[in-house]
Image (tube, rainbow, N blue to C red):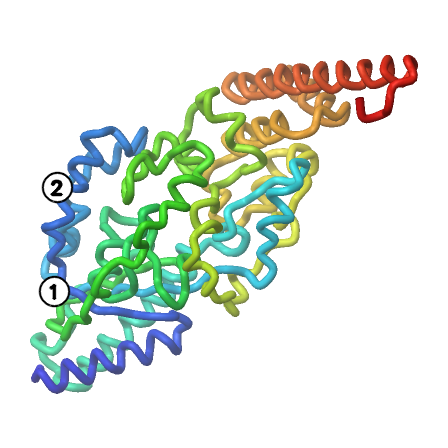
């Protein structure tokens, strides 16, 4: 295939990607050698926590050509997911509601993006066969990936010109912020590559570092997964360390704080993609309503959702912590107490913590009430 034909194909690929619903696509080679020392240092520090697969795959994450032999280029795509009525503040402000990271309110993004990337790969293959029906004109074996393989998607996206990696380790785009999904299509075509963003544009801003509830951003561009609420509520299969439970508030699946505080997200666009529209039963849901779900209810309400993969056990664990951080209401304490006898050991541990926490909070509130009554009886002002 000639250079002119490759350039035209690259141009057409970007048009097809937009037709398929992607907001941007960039093309890069597979060389991530500069990322390997950073990745190894992150692994050596244990920041991956219990995600052992990261250590097992090792440097393959920085070598796409090893993941799929014959790969010459990576097509990196992004798709906005921010819903029109995100309800960030209203949900975080109300401790009786459960906060779910906005990316998980709709359909599982893995399925949405992978299906579109597959269609993109098929169009590329068809074009190549039209140009020249010989093996030298085909993209060879091509494969789509959406957060489903050992691949450094953010550095690849940055190298492909989609943005820069911010201090919270997420990709930032100057016209779209960071509320978007990333995906990759590996191909065996020597397409012309795109230029990366000239420099990262976080400047001196450290808002994301300062806002993190658990101090998970331990240095600019370095996230200790063991402290991250997204890791604790999703990837972590065991108990949530007690030191982090009070800091989680009502976050029951993931956390968006570092994105919410980022100035670049003033430019984030709402997604018109209907698959990412919030499901009513997951958008600003009352914690006690979620706590009342049986396992079959959980499976029914999370069908086709990324939330389902954490399973009912972790779901109950997360809810117990959120209830423990909420108001010390008789309804919440009764619901927790009722579930304690039949709860699995790990969930029971979190229920006991929640009940103890609520009991302490209730005692403090009762003490304040008793003090106020005594003051009133003595004729002191109500505010005394």
Please name the residue shown 32% across and 59% down the image.
183
- Name the residue rendered at 17%, 65% in the picture: 28
Which quadrant, please, contains the N terminus? Answer: bottom left
Q: Is residue 384 left or right of residue 12?
A: right
Instruction: Tell me where residue 55 appears, x and y as whole percent.
Output: 21, 34
Front position in the image: 88 or 375: 375
In front: label 1 or label 2: 2
- Horizontal and vertical percent position of residue 343: 59, 20
Residue 37 disc label: 2
Residue at image position (30%, 33%) is 51
Neighbourhood count class around disc 1 (C-alpha, 10 Å): few under 14, some 14–19, many 20 upward? many
Say which quarter of the image contains residue 192. bottom left
| Residue located beneath label 1 in the image | 72
Q: Are marks 1 and 2 in contact (CB under 8 Å)?
A: no
Residue 296 vs residue 189, the one in the foreground: 189
* Residue 303 visible in the picture: yes
Residue at the image point whose x is 52% and y is 32% from the top: 248
> In the structure shown, which secondary structural element does the residue marked by tag 2 occupy?
helix
| Left or right: where 320 falls relative to 150 | right
Sequence-wise first label, 1 or 2: 2
Q: Secondary structure at mark 1?
A: loop
């Amino acid at each position: 295939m000639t250079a002119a034909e490759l350039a035209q194909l690259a141009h057409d690929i970007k048009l097809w990607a937009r037709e398929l619903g992607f907001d941007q696509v960039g093309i890069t080679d597979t060389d991530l050698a500069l990322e390997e020392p950073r990745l190894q240092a992150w692994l050596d520090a244990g920041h991956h926590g219990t995600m052992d697969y990261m250590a097992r795959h090792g440097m393959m994450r920085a070598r796409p050509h090893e993941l799929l032999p014959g790969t010459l280029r990576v097509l990196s795509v992004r798709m906005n997911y921010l819903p029109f009525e995100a309800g960030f503040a209203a949900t975080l402000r109300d401790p009786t509601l459960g906060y779910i990271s906005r990316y998980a309110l709709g359909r599982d993004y893995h399925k949405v993006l992978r299906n579109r990337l597959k269609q993109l790969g098929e169009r590329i293959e068809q074009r190549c066969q039209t140009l020249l029906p010989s093996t030298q004109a085909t993209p060879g074996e091509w494969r789509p990936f959406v957060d489903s393989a050992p691949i450094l998607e953010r550095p690849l996206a940055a190298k492909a010109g989609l943005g820069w990696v911010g201090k919270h380790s997420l990709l930032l785009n100057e016209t779209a912020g960071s509320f978007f999904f990333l995906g990759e299509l590996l191909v065996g075509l020597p397409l012309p590559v795109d230029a990366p963003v000239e420099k990262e544009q976080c400047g001196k801003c450290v808002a994301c570092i300062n806002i993190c509830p658990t101090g998970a951003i331990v240095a600019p561009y370095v996230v200790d997964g063991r402290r991250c609420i997204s890791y604790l509520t999703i990837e972590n299969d065991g108990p949530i360390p007690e030191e982090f439970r009070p800091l989680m508030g009502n976050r029951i699946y993931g956390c968006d704080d570092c994105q919410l505080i980022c100035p670049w997200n003033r430019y984030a666009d709402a997604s018109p993609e209907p698959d990412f529209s919030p499901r009513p039963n997951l958008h600003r849901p009352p914690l006690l309503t979620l706590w009342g779900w049986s396992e079959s209810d959980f499976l029914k309400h999370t069908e086709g959702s990324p939330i389902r993969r954490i399973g009912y056990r972790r779901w109950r664990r997360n809810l117990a912590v959120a209830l423990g951080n909420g108001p010390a209401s008789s309804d919440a304490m009764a619901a927790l107490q009722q579930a304690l006898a039949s709860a699995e050991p790990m969930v029971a541990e979190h229920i006991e913590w929640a009940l103890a926490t609520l009991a302490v909070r209730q005692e403090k509130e009762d003490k304040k009430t008793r003090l106020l009554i005594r003051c009133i009886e003595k004729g002191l002002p109500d505010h005394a």
